[in-house]
Image: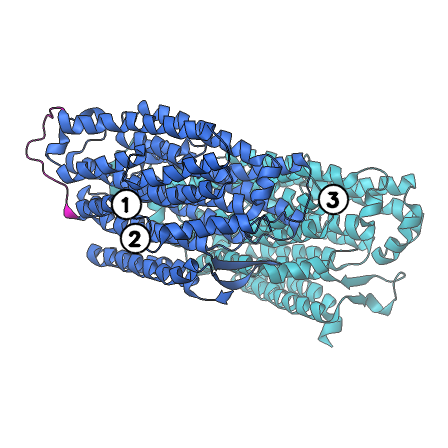
Amino acid sequence: MIETHLPAIIALTFVAFSILIPVFGIWKEELSQPLAVLGSGIAAFFSVYGFFVFLDVGMIRYPFGGWAPPIGIEFVYDGLSAFFLLVINVVTFIALIYSKYRGRAEFPGKEMPFYSLTMLMMLGFNGILLTGDLFNLFVFLEIASLSMYSLISIGKKPASYAAFRYLIIGTAGGTLYLLGVGYLYTITGTLNIIDMSAMLPTFAENSSVVAALLLMVVGIGIKAALFPTHGWLPDSYTFTSSPSSILIAPIGTKVAAYVLFRVMLYLFGIELTDAVMPLSYLVGILACIGIVYGSVMAIAQSNMKRMLAYSSVSQIGYIIMGLSLANPFGFAGALLHVLNHAVMKACLFMISGNITHREGNSDMSRFDESYRKKYPWSMASLSVAAISMVGLPPLAGFFSKWYLALGTVENGNWLFLGVIIVSSLLNAVYFFRILERVYMNDPYEEEQTEEEQQKAVAAATYNEPPASMLSPTVILALSLFAIGFANVLIVSALMGFFPL
Amino acid sequence: MDISLVPLFAILVSLVIVPLIYMSTNRPNLRETWTVIAALIKFGLVLTLLPGALEGKSVEIHLFELAPGLPLALNADPFGVFFALIASGLWIFTSFYSIGYMRGAGEKKQTRYFASFAVCLSATIGIAFSANLLTFILFYEALTLATYPLVIHNEKKDAIKAGRGYLAYTLTAGLLLVAGAALIYHYTGTLDFTPGGLFQELELPQSTMLVLFIIFLGGVGVKAGLMPIHSWLPEAMAAPTPVSALLHAVAVVKSGVFAVIRIVGFVFGTDVMVDYGLSDILIVVAGVTIILASLLAFAQDNLKRRLAYSTVGHLSYIVLGVAMITPLGMTGGMMHIAAHATMKITLFFCAGAIYVNLHRTEISNLNGIAKVMPWTMAAFVIGSMGLSGIPPINGFFSKWYLAMGALEGGMLVPVGVLVLSGMLNAGYFFPIVYRAYFKKGEGLEGYGEASPFMVVPIMVTATLSVLFGLFPNLFFGFFDLAVDISATLFNSASP
C-alpha cells in the first residue's frame, strides 16, 4: 500500500507540516523547530525507504486523482528523483536538527514563520523532483523560490537586499523557463514529460523547439547559479541567517541542476539537445568558467560564509560539467558530487555556524591556534571536509572527481580534465590557508610574540557549541569517510539511472 | 598467488599506535616506546615476506572495491618487499635517533611529531605494497598529508613557506597522477601493476603516449626530485633533522623513485619505453639533474641544504639506471635505492647530531669539530666516500652496476655523467671533511660527543654502508633480489 503511494506521501508530509507548524507555533513557539524536525524526519525516512523500494520494483508512476496522464498530472518516482529526494531530505533533516539554537539566537520571535516557510520550500523542492509534468514543475519551482526569497531575507541587514536581488533575477529565470514550456506545449500539445519526450524527436529541428530548449536551459541555469548568472548567490548565502544558509546552500542549486538533468538528458535526450548546436558542450564550458571563477573568488574572501558561497558557485559547476559530458561516468560523477557536495557544504556551513555561535562572527582573519583547543571537534571536521573538498582519497570528494575525470577522458575532453585539476589546487589554497591558521602558530603575527601566542593557546578552554549543533557537524564529517568507502555501491546504482 | 594478511598488518601496525601515542602525550617514555615497538613489529612483518620474495613469489590481498573494477588491493611482490624492507629497517634507527634528537633539541609538539611519523611509515609501506595505481595514489596522497606537519614542525616563517611549497608541488603531482590514471584506465581498462606494462597489446599514437608519459613524469617526478620540479626539497630542510633523514633521504623521495620504477617497469613497460623513445627523455632529464644538482650543492653553505642537493643528484642516479632500460642498469638503480638510503641517512644523522650538540648548521662553522665529535665525523667520512663512489662503500658498488648497465646498452654519455658526478660529489663533500679534521676550531671547549641515542644509530647505519659495499648479499640476499626483479621486468616484456 505504502509503496504505491510513496511519491504522494513524501510531498504531502511537507504540506501537512507547513500547516501544523503555524497552528502549534502560535500556541507555543518553541514547538516549531521540533515539528519541523519531525516533518523532515518522516520525509527523510520515506525517501530512504523509497530509494530501496525503487531499486526493488523500478519506476513508480502516481497519477493524481485517478486521471491517467497525459490528461491528469502524475508524480514519477524514477532513479534520478529517488536519488535527489534521498539526498535533499536527509541533509535537510540533519540541518533542521542543527538549527535549534542558532535560530533562537539569530531570529528570535520569527521561529514559527521560519520553520513553516522551510516546510513550504521543501514541498517545492520535493514537488520539482517528483512531478512528471512540465507546468507543474514550474509551479513547484515558484513555491520553492518564493519560500527561499523569504528565508534568505531573514538575516542581517543586507539580507533583505540580497533576497530582493535574488527575487528579481530568480523570477526572470522562472519566466524564461515558463516561456520555454509554453513553446513546447504549442508544438506538442502535451505537458507530460514522458509523453513529450516520445514526441520530440519528430520536431527536433523545429525552431520553436530549439528556442524552447534554450529558454529552459538559460532559465534554469539562473536558478542553478550557472556562470555568468551566479550573481545573486554570494550575497544571499553570506548575509542570510546561519540556519537558512545551512538549509539552502547544500540543496538549493542542486534541485535546479536536477531540472537541467531532467530537461537535457531525459526530456530531450542528449542527441536532441545537441542536434542543432553543441549545447551540452557550451553549458560545460560555462560550468568550467564557473568552477575556476568560483574558486578564485573564494580565495579572495576573508569571511568564511562568503568563501563557502563562492565555493558553491564552483562546486555546482562540477555537477553541471558532469551532466554536459553525457556519458555514464560523467553522469555518475555528477550525481555522486550532488551527494558529496551537499554533505560537505552542510558540514562546512555548520562549522561556520558553530564558530559564529561562540565568537559572534566567522571572520577568518580571527582564526588562530586557540581555535584548535576551543573547538577541537569542529576543527577536526573542518579538516576532513576540507580534504574532501580538495579531493584527496579516500574521502568522498576524491571519488566524484575520479568519475568526472573518467567521464572527461571518455569524451576526449582535455580542457575539462585540466579544469578539474586546476580547481582542486585552488580549493587546496583556500582550505589549507584556514587549516594553517588553526593548527599552528602564526609567525607573521606582529602584535604578539610566539610566547604570548602560546600563552593564549594554553589559556583557551574547550568551548564547543551544544550537542545538537556539534553532533550533526561531526556526523556529516564522518559520513564523508563512509561515502568514500561505499562509493562503489552508490555509483553502480547511479550508473543504472543513466538514460540510454 | 597466495593470499596473506601480512602486508595489511605491516601497513596498519604504525597506524594503530597513533591513538596510543596521543593518549600518552604526558608520558614521553611510554609514547616513544610505542614508536619503537611498532618499528620493530613492522620490520619483522616485512621480513617474513622476504623468503617468498626471494623465490619470486608474491602474496596479495583484496580488501574492497575503491571504484568499480578497481579494488583496494595490496600485493607484496619482490620489488615491494625490497623497498618496504629498506624503509621499515631504517625506521628503527630513525626512531631511536629521533628520541635523542627531539629531546636534545627540546623541540615542542613532540606528540604530533611522533604521530605524523608513524602515519608516514604506514603510507610508505602502503606505497610499497600497492597492487594497482589507484591504491598507490591513495597512499601517495596520504604520505603527502602526513609529511606536511613534519615539514612545518617548528612553525617559523621559513618552515611555513617550505610547507606551502611542499603542498603546492606534491598536490599538483598527485592530481596529475589521478589524471594519468584516468587516462590509462580509459585506454587499457586496468590499473594493476604488471611486470612488462599495461600496453602490451595496444598501439597508441606517439603524441598520446608522450603526453601520457609527461603527465606521469610530473606526477612522480616531484617526489623523486627531478629537475626542474625539485625545488621543494631543499626548502623542506627547514624540518627537524630526523625528518630530513628518514623522509627526505628514504621514505618520501624514495617513494618517488620507487614510483618511477613502478611507472616505467610496471605501467608503461620496458618495450614501450624504448619503442616510443620515452627512455631517452628520462635519460636526459636524469643526466641533467645529476650534473646541475651536484654543481648547485657547491653553492650551499648550510650543511643540510648541501645534503639536500646531493639527494636530488643521487635520486637521479636511480632514475638514470632505470631509464637506460638494461637489466644491469635496472639492478644498479635498485641497489642505489638501498645504498643511497644508508649513506644519506648517516650523513643527515651526522648533521643533526652536530646541530643538537654544537648548534651549528653552516659548513663554514664546522672547523675542527672532528676533535670533539670523532665518532660522528668518522661516520660522515664513510658516507661522503660512499656517495663519491669510492670503494669499498656500497655507493661504489651500485655505481659500478649503473656504469655496467650503460655500457650494456652501448651508451657512453651516462658513464661520463657518472664519472663527472662522482668527482663533483667528492668536490663538495671533502672540503667539509677537511675543515672538520684539519682546520683549527673555535669555541669548542666543553663540548663532547652527542648523546648515545644519536651516535649509536649513526654508527650502525655507517657500518651497514660498509658491509653492504663489501658483501651485498650479506643481509637477506639483497643483491640477488634486485637482480631477480629486474630480470622479471625484462623477461615478461620480451617473451
Q: Position of residue A327 (x, y in %)?
A: 73, 49
Judging by the rendered image, the residue that carries numbered circle 1 is: B470
Host chain of mark 1: B
Judging by the rendered image, the residue that carries numbered circle 2 is: B474
The disc labelled 1 sits on which kind of residue? Answer: Leu
Q: Main secondary structure of the magenta part?
A: loop
Circle 1 — which element?
helix
User: What's the CA distance linking mark 2 and mark 1?
Assistant: 9 Å
Query: What are the residue bounds of the magenta stretch?
Result: B439-452
Indicate the quadrant where residue B49 lies. bottom left
Picture layout, residue A446 above or below residue B245: above
Residue occupying the far bottom of the picture: A1
Q: Residues within 10 Å of mark 2 (few under 14, many from 20)?
A: few
Q: Residue at x 24, y 27 (%)?
A: B430
Host chain of mark 3: A
Marks 2 and 1 close (CB-CB < 8 Å): yes
Chain given the colour blue: B
User: What's the CA distance linking mark 3 and mark 2?
Assistant: 72 Å
Circle 3 — which element?
helix
The disc labelled 2 sits on which kind of residue? Answer: Leu
Picture layout, residue B478 above or below residue B279: below
Chain given the colour cyan: A
Q: Position of residue A275 (x, y in %)?
A: 85, 42
Host chain of mark 2: B
- Nearer to me, A318 or B283: B283
Q: Position of residue A429 (x, y in %)?
A: 48, 37
